[in-house]
Image (cartoon, rainbow, N blue to C red):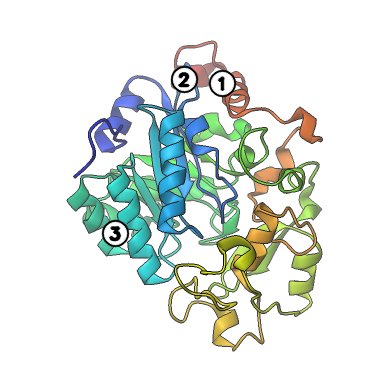
Amino acid sequence: MMPAGTAVLDRRAIEAVVASGRALLVQGGMGLHASDGLAGKVARATSRIFVCAGTVSAVGKTPGMLEAELRRAKAEAPGGYVGVNLMAAIHHDDFARLARTALDEGVSFLVQGAGISREVVRWCRDAGTPFGGIVSSGRLAAMYEHWGADFLVAEGAEAGGHIGDIDHPLGALLREVRGASTLPVIAAGGVDAEDVAALLADGAAGVQLATRFLACSDGDSAPAFKEMHLGKGAEDVTVITSCVKGMKARAIRNAFTDALAAGQHFPPRSKAWFFGKEGYLGRTKACIECLGLGLCKCRASEFRESFCITDALLRAAILGDTVHGLFYTGQSVTRIRERTLANLPSVQGIVEHLEEVVGARSPSPRAALGSL
């Protein structure tokens, strides 16, 4: 059962936010440890027009790591909304362990994408934890509502990382999802401050920002990781073929993405530098089998094709390796205003800028839309 004192972000709570004239502002859970240290700061951020929620990414964590990150976030934001993002594409045993850890810790919500899992919806229902499905079509939205989801995250083609449908922009997807489901919908994927008013006008209950929060003065990611997101133009963003089922994924262009485009492959290397000699959940080989059976192109080719995604993402977020790391990013990276690390805003500063852009002189972002 849900631990006492947990702030629950269920359908009723979201509908109450909208009825009050406000909107949700959700920080997306990103990559392998890329967004660590952010969830609690977002959950405690104050705003006149937004209700803020932080999300911890469970991917690439051991249950102990996830437990520690959740407890840190909840300590930073007592009574705030702190949720977990979990990918269905990871090793199934890891998926089950991490889901159980999140539910035992009493998260405000659990969101799941990168595949479909009906069982996690059941686990959430049994634990009394709200479930949100990340969707890229109206069909999947209707499916999740039928299964008992509390809300949906409509993630459009402008998103960072793996893209559900590269030809399905967020505006069109939001309208499709709202037409297929009665659940509250959070609009996500390449969202920037200038997009918020239009998305709310189109009926979104709130917005999810991820890339913008990566480039802030808060958070644990390496300084070079943050700097990699600054001063980027359209030519600095590329779409790669991922090792995950050959899906398309958006990233910042660098030597690594250029090498992938040229057909080079990058077999897995030891991860003892990060997980220790005991390995990841006891798996000590270079390939820690992070993805579900049959989903990794690198492993399926006996490491003669594609790349090890855990190596590439850890090198980016933890080491700040701008040459060999993989920097997943949303298209909104081209609209980040700051050019130096010294000028990066805090989480609270980002929230305040959003208020200014949406027109926060009105007590309601939805009322403010008419003056924009």
- How dense is the environment of label 1, judged by Cα within 10 Å: few (below 14), some, or many (20 and up)? many
Q: Is residue 164 above or below residue 79?
A: below
Q: Disc 2 residue type?
A: Ile
Q: Does label 1 or label 2 sit earlier along the sequence?
A: 2
Residue closer to the observer: 29 or 203: 29
Residue closer to the observer: 41 or 330: 41
Of helix, strand and loop, which one carries label 1? helix
Marking on residue 355: 1
Q: Does label 2 or label 3 sit earlier along the sequence?
A: 2
Marking on residue 49: 2
Q: Disc 1 residue type?
A: Glu
Residue 142 lies in what quarter of the image? bottom left
Q: Disc 3 residue type?
A: Val
Query: Cβ–Cβ below 8 Å for labels 2 and 3?
Result: no
Task: Please identify, in this view, whether the residue under mark 1 or under mark 3 is nearer the observer.
Answer: 3
Of helix, strand and loop, which one carries label 2? loop
Marking on residue 120: 3
Is 330 on the left-hand or right-hand side of 89?
right
Residue closer to the observer: 247 or 33: 33
Position in image of residue 35 (x %, y %):
57, 45
